Image (cartoon, grey):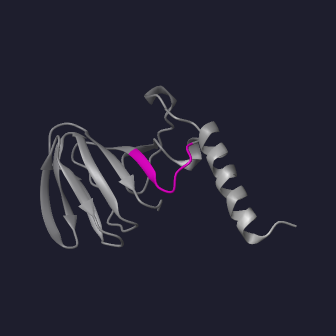
Amino acid sequence: MDDFYAGWLKYWDDEQEERRNARKYINEEELEWVRTKQDWRGALLGAEENGFVTCGATMLAEITRGWHTGKHSHGEEAVYIVDGQGFSVIDGLRYDWETGSCLFIPFGVVHQHFNSGDNTVRYLSAMAIPL
């Protein structure tokens, strides 16, 4: 039987092999869109569930006109507004945003997103750890 150090080295080698063989890209046509409690619809981009080797997750989500997400919390998250306008309530404070804005939500902080514009909001979410 190998000693602990040999085990660590094997773990490293196995991990590198897994990364070499893992998925490297995804096209929008391949996304699996679902309606969630939080979003009008959302789809995983870079996530273990669709073949990427990662500790976090990225998601593309939409909030239809006049709609809002549920109030929720999870691990830390960065949100980039791809298209649309609205506002988010993060830890009780309101932050207005529009196309090109970026929000940071700290770990465990309660937040909610609102579409206050005329079109569907589309945003990219990067979470350090999945919900």
The segment highlighted magenta reads 52-59
| Outermost right residue | 1
- Magenta segment: does it hold 22? no
Question: What kind of secondary structure does the magenta stretch mostly adopt?
Answer: loop
User: Which corner quadrant of the image does residue 2 belong to?
Assistant: bottom right
**Above or below for 77 versus 49:** below
Badge count: 0
Quadrant for the N terminus in the image: bottom right
- In the image, taking residue 75 as reference, residue 22 lies left or right, namely right
- In the image, taking residue 98 as reference, residue 20 lies left or right, namely right
Q: Residue at x 64, y 51 (%)?
A: 15
- In the image, taking residue 97 as reference, residue 51 lies left or right, namely right
- In the image, taking residue 45 as reference, residue 116 lies left or right, namely left
Residue 117: percent from the left, percent from the top?
14, 43
Asked whether 70 or 10 is in front, the reply is: 10
Q: Residue at x 42, y 57 (%)?
A: 37
Residue 44: percent from the left, percent from the top?
47, 44
